Image (spheres, rainbow, N blue to C red):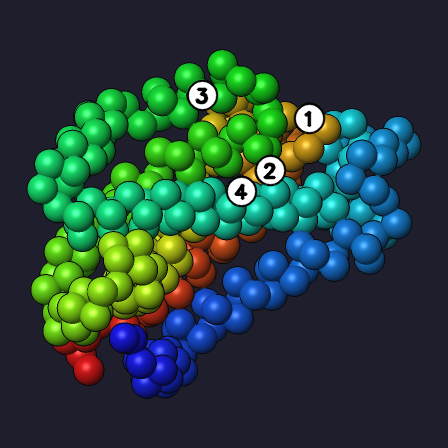
């Protein structure tokens, strides 16, 4: 079983990297700001200020980041966009990890024809255009629904997870502790749940950390195309799309959400890379 020492050693390595700590601090700060920031503004996310349409940052004291063309406060809408983008990224990653870990561990441990058929199904889905499948799912069902959107993204994102977990399971099922559990009469579900999956957590956590920014970026791309989050809600992608329409006259409408998106993606990727290096057994 994976010992507590692995995580203690990983945390020690993470603390030794100033770049990772700074990126982690910025990501946490952006998340906290997204949660409590709208409470500091006198405006709600859908409040229309008809006296201040498309006002730039600093022009009006109560609109810290300016307003959009309908007079909505850009500070509040951007932070709500961060909330929705993070929510979709986290939940879609959990969906993809749940399906991928289950699928890959069962295929790798059971083996034989079960493994062959399960992985051939993965190969078939891999051969299909990823974006095309998600677009079909989001257009066939309720367009703009957060539930449909995160399920559509997460339901396809599990393919890489399944391959990674299967490869790790093929190695783990020949280990002595698995053989001992099998000899004592533990069934296949018990071995997978109690012995295989816990020993995969290092790889799973690393991939989860790296998949979150991928999910956020993909959701932003869909929202930019008009297939993601719909009004009155807004994600960073939909805010960037709205800002791109007003880029010449109101460039702050594009720059503010784009700055938050880039900052969040860079920090999450740095943290993911740092966690991957910290859990790398070759450096232990």
The C terminus - image quarter: bottom left
Residue found at the far front of this picture: 185
Q: Quadrant of residue 137?
A: top left
Q: CA distance from mark 3 to mark 1?
A: 19 Å
* Badge nearest the viewer, 3 or 1: 3
The residue pinned by badge 3 equals 137
The location of residue 198, given as percent across then percent down, is 32, 66
* Badge nearest the viewer, 4 or 3: 3
Which residue is at a point 26% across and 58% down the rendered structure image? 187
Q: Earlier in the sequence, mark 4 or mark 3?
A: 4
The N terminus - image quarter: bottom left
Dot 2 crowding, Cα within 10 Å, few <14, some 14–19, many 20+: many
SS type, badge 2: loop
Q: CA distance from mark 4 to mark 3?
A: 16 Å
The location of residue 247, given as percent across then percent down, is 58, 30
Q: CA distance from mark 1 to mark 2?
A: 10 Å
Which residue is at a point 70% across and 56% down the rendered structure image? 35
* Badge nearest the viewer, 2 or 3: 3
Q: Earlier in the sequence, mark 1 or mark 4?
A: 4
C-beta proximity under 8 Å, tags 2 and 4: yes
The residue pinned by badge 2 equals 235
Point out which mark residue 88 bears.
4
Dot 1 crowding, Cα within 10 Å, few <14, some 14–19, many 20+: few
The residue pinned by badge 1 equals 231
* Badge nearest the viewer, 1 or 4: 4
Task: Note whether residue 38 is visible.
Answer: yes
């Amino acid at each position: 079983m994976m010992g507590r020492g692995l995580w203690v050693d990983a945390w020690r390595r993470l603390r030794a990297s100033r770049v990772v700590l700074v990126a982690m601090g910025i990501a946490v700060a952006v998340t906290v700001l997204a949660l409590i920031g709208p409470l500091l503004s006198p405006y709600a996310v859908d409040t229309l200020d008809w006296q201040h349409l498309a006002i730039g940052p600093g022009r009006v004291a109560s609109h810290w980041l300016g307003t959009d063309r309908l007079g909505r406060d850009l500070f509040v809408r951007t932070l709500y966009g961060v909330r929705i983008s993070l929510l979709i990224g986290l939940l879609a990653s959990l969906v993809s990890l749940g399906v991928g870990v289950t699928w890959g561990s069962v295929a790798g441990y059971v083996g034989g024809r079960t493994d062959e058929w399960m992985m051939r199904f993965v190969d078939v889905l891999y051969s299909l255009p990823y974006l095309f499948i998600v677009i079909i799912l989001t257009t066939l069902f309720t367009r703009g629904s957060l539930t449909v959107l995160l399920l559509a993204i997460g339901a396809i994102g599990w393919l890489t997870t399944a391959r990674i977990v299967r490869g790790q399971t093929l190695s783990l099922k020949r280990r002595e502790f698995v053989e001992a559990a099998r000899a004592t009469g533990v069934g296949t579900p018990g071995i997978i749940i109690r012995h295989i999956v816990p020993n995969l957590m290092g790889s799973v956590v690393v991939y989860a950390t790296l998949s979150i920014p991928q999910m956020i970026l993909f959701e932003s791309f869909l929202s930019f195309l008009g297939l993601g989050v719909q009004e009155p809600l807004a994600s960073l992608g939909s805010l960037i799309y709205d800002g791109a329409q007003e880029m010449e006259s109101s460039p702050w409408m594009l720059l503010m959400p784009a700055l938050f998106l880039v900052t969040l993606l860079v920090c999450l990727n740095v943290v993911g890379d740092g966690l991957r290096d910290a859990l790398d057994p070759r450096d232990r």
